[in-house]
Amino acid sequence: MFIFCTAFLLTACEKGKTNMSKESTGSDATTWKPIDSATATKAWMAYATPGDMHKMLAKYGGNWTGETTMWMEEGGKPMKSTSECSNKMIFDGRYQMSNYKGNFMGMPFEGMSIMGYDNAKKKFVSTWIDNMGTGIMKAEGEWNASKKSIEFKGTATDPSRPDKDCEMREVYTFTDDNNHTLEMYGPDWKTGKEMKTMEIKFTRKK
């Protein structure tokens, strides 16, 4: 499978290289760096093999209860609710799929995230969708070993300003095997300055 994928990639990229050479008169055509099939295969093998970061995510599989606190504006009254989350590793331990259920301002809320660790980028990657929108939030994050946390930075659609994506930040802190916290930050709708919009304290269900 790896040999097939590598061969396909090299063929496609070689065609792309040829097209760039024909169409480009600038520096684009000279930036392509061809590699041999053995090097490409080795890179793909490393890229596709789950490692320690994937094993760390797998430790947080199972069912969780969440204590959620939300803020609509800086200094505003916090709104509290409870939620449930189930985490499951998929594709032979390469990604963690999480399903959330709770409520938002008295309305049923459902969301799903896919989180993984990109071996090539050396970064965590995630996507998020829910029943309160029609877009996809995308983010990348760095592992902080001293804090046992991942800080994600990404973008999401702001329906009130659809011409520009909204910058978001999430921090996952893994307290221990049975507890972890998610903090979300986004712009205050009045000032545009970053504020803490949500915090969920997860406890493993027994």
Image: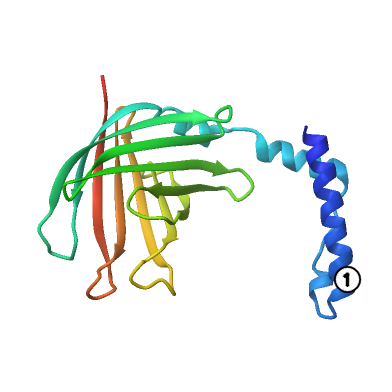
Which residue is painted at 26% across and 24% down in the image? 205
Relative placement, left or right, of 157 versus 116 is left
Q: In which quadrant of the rendered view does residue 178 lie? A: top left
Disc 1 crowd, CA 10 A, few/some/many (<14, 14-19, 20+): some
Q: In which quadrant of the rendered view does residue 153 lie? A: bottom left
Q: Is residue 22 above or below residue 123?
A: below
For the C terminus, the image quarter is: top left
Q: Secondary structure at mark 1?
A: helix
For the N terminus, the image quarter is: top right
- Asked whether residue 39 appears in the rendered view, the answer is no
Q: Nearer the viewer, residue 55 or 19?
A: 19
Point out residue 43 in the picture as x, y percentages from the top left corner. 74, 43
Point out residue 171 in the picture as x, y percentages from the top left corner. 35, 50
Which residue is painted at 81% across and 80% down in the image? 26
Relative placement, left or right, of 90 versus 174 is right
Q: Nearer the viewer, residue 61 or 90?
A: 90
